[in-house]
Image (spheres, rainbow, N blue to C red):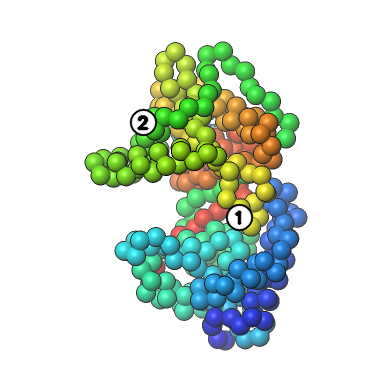
């Protein structure tokens, strides 16, 4: 069976299948929104045909899309939840052609997002891909701001505090704390992020000082994500303040504020190796919707 870049008719077949599969997943998972616009998806795929491969002529039985992003020496090929279909064997055949092309563009690894508990998840696992991150979503209805006398949650732009909490998260992930030039670069990135009009840095403090942080911004529109979703990032609680409900209090305050601002959902991404984070987000009402897997190329 041939692997090739699709013609217009084949793109339409792929778009139709992706919409049907994601819609079926959305019906079974109320947190995922259905994909309504097949024509828009077909248009997007057609425009990026050079990064799309299909298996089988006419009515392709499987597809794989991968965008190579990042600096050429450390680039990564990314496949979204709508970027692949087919059995393990189909995907293996598609990879035989796609992977050398990604490598030639400088990619050293391939990352794939797939719906949790989907056939795609087991197919990629069988191909040697390892789970790396989980994305959790929750609806915001019925929330009210929690009350607590000893901890105050407020919005403040404080790049140095954000930098310190990045260190906390790096330490959790076993990543060496950024110093020198890398730290200056990160400070600039954080300053840029916090300067965005839609970004808010929430801090939880007590008379002891700053205890916790959450940085939020509207989620980028992605297929399957509800329209008004707030993305939570850089969530961390100072080591000495953990397991006292500070993290939960901060997140519940942020979510109640988001609901009041018209958001309907919130999402967050965490490393699957960070079991504490997984337990925390489940306790805060988030359910895993998609999982990111990766493999070196
Ligand atoms: C994950 C983290 C934010 C949790 O903050 P916290 O203030 O300690 O959490 P809370 O005390 O509010 O806990 C709320 C619930 O989360 C779960 N939870 C939190 N920490 C847990 C742990 N170490 N083990 C198991 N469950 C845990 C529990 O269900 C807990 O409820 P309970 O105490 O009634 O059992 C904190 O451990 C942290 O900052 N870790 C390092 C940075 C990090 O991993 N950030 C997440 C990035 S996505």
Residue under the point 66% across and 85% down: 58
Circle 2 Cα neighbour tier, 10 Å, few/some/many (<14 / 14–19 / ≥20) = few
Residue 296 shows in the view: no
- SS class of the residue under badge 1? loop
Residue under the point 35% across and 61% down: 71
In the image, residue 231 sits, relative to residue 60, either above or below, namely: above
- Please, which residue is most extreme toward the right here? 27
Give the x, y percent position of residue 122.
57, 62
The numbered mark at residue 154 is none
Residue under the point 42% across and 15% down: 208
The mark that comes first in sequence, 1 or 2, is 2
Give the x, y percent position of residue 121.
57, 60
Residue 266 shows in the view: yes
Give the x, y percent position of residue 67.
48, 66
Give the x, y percent position of residue 45.
59, 71
* Label 2 CB less than 8 angstroms from ligand 1: no
Residue denoted by label 2: 160
Q: Nearer the viewer, residue 43 or 12?
A: 43
Residue 262 picture quarter:
top right
Q: Nearer the viewer, residue 116 or 206?
A: 206
Residue denoted by label 1: 222
Q: Quadrant of the C terminus?
A: bottom left
Residue 172 picture quarter:
top left
Residue 173 picture quarter:
top left
Mark 1 and mark 2: Cα distance apart in space? 31 Å
- SS class of the residue under badge 2? helix
């Amino acid at each position: 069976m041939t692997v090739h870049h699709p013609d217009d008719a084949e793109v339409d077949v792929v778009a139709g299948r992706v919409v049907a599969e994601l819609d079926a997943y959305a019906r079974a998972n109320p947190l995922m929104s259905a994909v309504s616009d097949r024509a828009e998806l077909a248009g997007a795929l057609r425009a990026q045909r050079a990064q799309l491969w299909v298996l089988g002529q006419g009515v392709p039985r499987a597809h794989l899309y991968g965008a190579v992003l990042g600096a050429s020496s450390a680039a990564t090929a990314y496949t979204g939840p709508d970027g692949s279909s087919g059995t393990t064997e189909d995907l293996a055949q598609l990879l035989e052609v796609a992977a050398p092309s990604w490598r030639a563009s400088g990619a050293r690894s391939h990352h794939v997002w797939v719906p949790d508990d989907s056939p795609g998840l087991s197919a990629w696992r069988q191909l040697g891909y390892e789970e790396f991150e989980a994305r959790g979503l929750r609806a915001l209805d019925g929330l009210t701001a929690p009350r607590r006398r000893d901890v105050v949650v407020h919005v403040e732009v404080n790049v140095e505090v954000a930098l310190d909490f990045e260190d906390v998260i790096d330490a959790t992930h076993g990543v060496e704390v950024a110093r020198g030039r890398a730290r200056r670069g990160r400070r600039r990135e954080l300053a840029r992020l916090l300067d965005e009009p839609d970004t808010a840095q929430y801090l939880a403090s007590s008379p002891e000082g700053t205890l916790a942080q959450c940085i939020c911004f509207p989620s980028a529109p992605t297929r399957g994500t509800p329209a008004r979703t707030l993305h939570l990032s850089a969530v961390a609680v100072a080591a000495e303040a953990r397991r006292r409900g500070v993290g939960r209090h901060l997140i519940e305050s942020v979510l109640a504020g988001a609901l009041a601002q018209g958001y309907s959902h919130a999402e967050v991404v965490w490393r699957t190796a960070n079991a504490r984070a997984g337990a925390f987000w489940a306790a805060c009402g988030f359910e895993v919707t998609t999982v990111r897997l990766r493999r070196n190329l």
